[in-house]
Amino acid sequence: MESGGRPSLCQFILLGTSSVVTAFLYSVYRQKAQVAHELKGAKKIHLGEDLKSILLEAPGKCVPYAVIEGAVRSVKETLNSQFVENCKGVIQRLTLQEHKMVWNRTTNLWNDYSKIIHQRTNTVPFDLVPHEDGLDVAIRVLKPLDSVDLGLETVYQKFHPSVQSFTDAIGHYISGERPKGIQETEEMLKVGATITGVGELVLDHNSIRLQPPKQGMQYYLSSQDFDSLLQRQESSVKLWKVLTLVFGFAACATLFFILRKQYQQRQERLRLRQRQEEFQEHEAQLLRGAAPEDRESLKSACVVCLSSFKSCVFLECGHVCSCAECYQALPEPKRCPVCRREITRVVPLYNS
């Protein structure tokens, strides 16, 4: 706290930072809670013979947010894995990721760093069909890449370490970057895999479509079952709630500390003002009761011992109120007897 009773710059920065972080965490928490609430309210529909009749009875032949579970079946052609034999799917994602060590000039440590240098995703049309045989019903899945939780399985992964000569190693140390290698990954949504789809279910003529919801709700094509998916979202909500409460408490504690310090400073100023008024009143009473020849000596008397003459100027307050002996006897840290401000420097007073 600064001398004027105002919060210091550090306290302002701490309060502002904790408030901004709390507001950001709260907005993320509200968003996560909204997603979990919408997911909990999604209508569970069984993929069976009665699916078309359910959609025919729904308003506009549409269920705005439905949960459906089925097995993946390609419509025409399938995608073959580039690395694994007899591995077929409907979505294929190939990724090249660079791994290297980067020198941090602040911590003076080597830190791991990775970035995707190339990624390609291939898709073919596919349906969701029942696990039971003999049921003639299928759901065409539209825009699968818009899903926030695409249930891809890693079918191939290999790390290619970089080969360096002695000259390359020296150059990398000088530049602050040491390549480790390239990670090659292939992910696929296999034919026959079980997928939980959450989105808009629409009956269009004689075909059923699962597509991204129009009300801004999230679209899922997850390899998890619905209960696990919902539990994961609720766990995320709890985590963000705890973080929001922790930083909110920190912001409130900082604000309370600042207000408490300001209140203490205000009370201290009121006490100092009261002491000054009492001292001035006491000095005036002494002057009124003293003989005329003693008034000048009383005006120049030390306010502590009232026997010696004032011989010190206290800085930074500027009061002349004490003799040198009484100044030396003041307890540490030395403060002005009149205003109680800390004495930083003493200038001798010479009377001619």
Image (cartoon, rainbow, N blue to C red):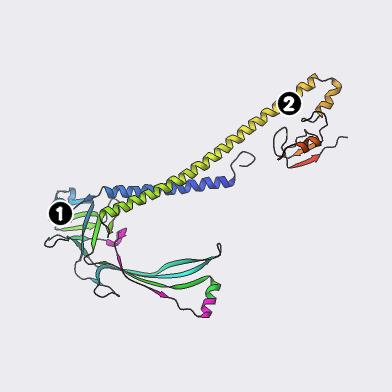
Q: Residue 30: x, y in percent? A: 37, 47
261 up-or-down from 283: above or below:
below
122 up-or-down from 228: above or below:
below
Residue of label 2 = 280
Q: Secondary structure at mark 1?
A: helix
Q: Which mark is residue 10?
A: none
Would residue 28 be seen by someone viewing this image from the given angle? no
Mark with earlier residue (1, 2): 1
Looking at the image, the residue that sits furthest to the right is 352
Of the 4 image quadrants, the one containing the N terminus is top right
- Give the distance between the C-alpha atoms of the residues marked 1 and 2, in whole angstroms: 94 Å
User: Would residue 150 be counted in the magenta stretch?
Assistant: yes
Q: Which residues are magenta?
A: 141-170
Which is more toward the observer, 120 or 29?
A: 29
The answer to which image quadrant residue 73 occupies is: bottom left
Of the 4 image quadrants, the one containing the C terminus is top right
Would residue 240 be seen by someone viewing this image from the given angle? yes
Q: Residue at x 44, y 76 (%)?
A: 162
Residue of label 1 = 51
Q: Residue 284: x, y in percent? A: 76, 23
215 up-or-down from 117: above or below:
above
Which is more toward the observer, 147 or 270?
A: 270
Residue 111 placement, left or right of 145 = right
> Given the image, on which type of amino acid does mark 2 rest?
Gln
Q: Residue at x 29, y 52 (%)?
A: 230
User: Would residue 113 be counted in the magenta stretch?
Assistant: no
